[in-house]
Amino acid sequence: MERLLDDEIVKQLSEMFANLKHPVALLYFGNQTDCEYCPQTLQLLEEIAVLSDRLQLYKFDEDENPEELKKFNVDKVPGIVIASLRDGEIVDHGIRYAGIPAGHEFTSLIRDILMVSSGDSGLKQETRDYLASLEKPIFLQVFVTPTCPYCPQAVVLAHQMAFESPNGGSRNGGGDGISHAGKRIRRQRGTAHHHQFWCRGINWSRSGVRSG
């Protein structure tokens, strides 16, 4: 299969990843029978993972490893989870992608890797304090298209908030920030347009709330 990342992109990523502080786990979820973008998604993660010894790729098949999809709260493939690695243990922060992070969403993926490795969301302290005080789980969803130049900021913001939430990614607490790139998912939500921000089943983009 032809490479997805050209030499210039590989060079840029190698330079960025040379300064990774902490190990990062890249978790791939897919199947081999009924998933149009699973092969490309897996290939993309494989090409990224080889660029640093601080990146570790884990592969899970939804038919062979259903318990892993349940454990990491993944219900769509291809799915990606960006997590920390601490003493060999995967620490889930609730950072998720549903669909291949192509086009502008590739930027979001790289920014998430850099954020998780640094251990710093980049949010203001007052925002971090507020997110740390949340007592109930909150599920954030951002619906995107690969050609939307404004979507990455919304995606990264959702992931920054998930990163700072207590027990991020847990079914029992914290919050998930998930980016949806699939047309089928957008149709289910009635989001024909890109850059839609959903929280607790409410489309805040239509409610006048702006991210960024």
Image (cartoon, helix red, strand yellow):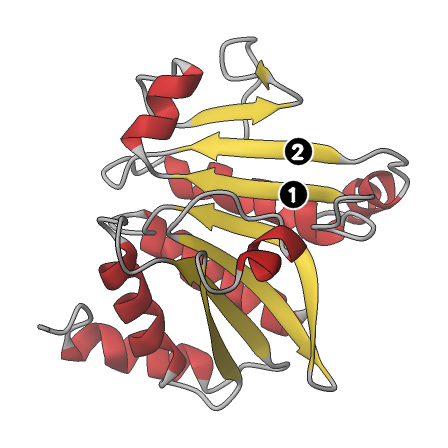
Q: Which of 113 and 185 is in front in this view?
A: 185
Q: In this view, does 74 lie above or below 40?
A: above
Q: Where is residue 104 in the image (x, y as percent from the top left)?
A: 29, 47
Residue shown at 40% from the left, 28% from the top: 195
Q: Where is residue 100 in the image (x, y as percent from the top left)?
A: 32, 51
The outermost residue toward the top is 207
In this figure, which residue is indicated by the disc labeled 2?
139
Characterize the local packing of mark 1: few (<14), some (14-19) or many (20 or more) Cα atoms within 10 angstroms.
many
Left or right of 9? Residue 169 is: right
* Amino acid type for the residue under numbered disc 2: Phe
User: In which quarter of the view is residue 212 placed?
Assistant: top right
Residue 120 can be seen, yes or no: no
Q: Is residue 71 above or below residue 17?
A: above
In this figure, which residue is indicated by the disc labeled 1?
176
Indicate the quadrant containing the N terminus: top left, top right, bottom left or bottom right.
bottom left
Q: What element carries label 1?
A: strand
Q: Nearer the viewer, residue 42 or 158?
A: 42
Residues at circles 1 and 2 in contact by the CB criterion of under 8 Å: yes
Q: Is residue 200 above or below residue 117?
A: above
* Amino acid type for the residue under numbered disc 1: Asp
Residue shown at 54% from the left, 32% from the top: 141
Left or right of 66? Residue 181 is: left
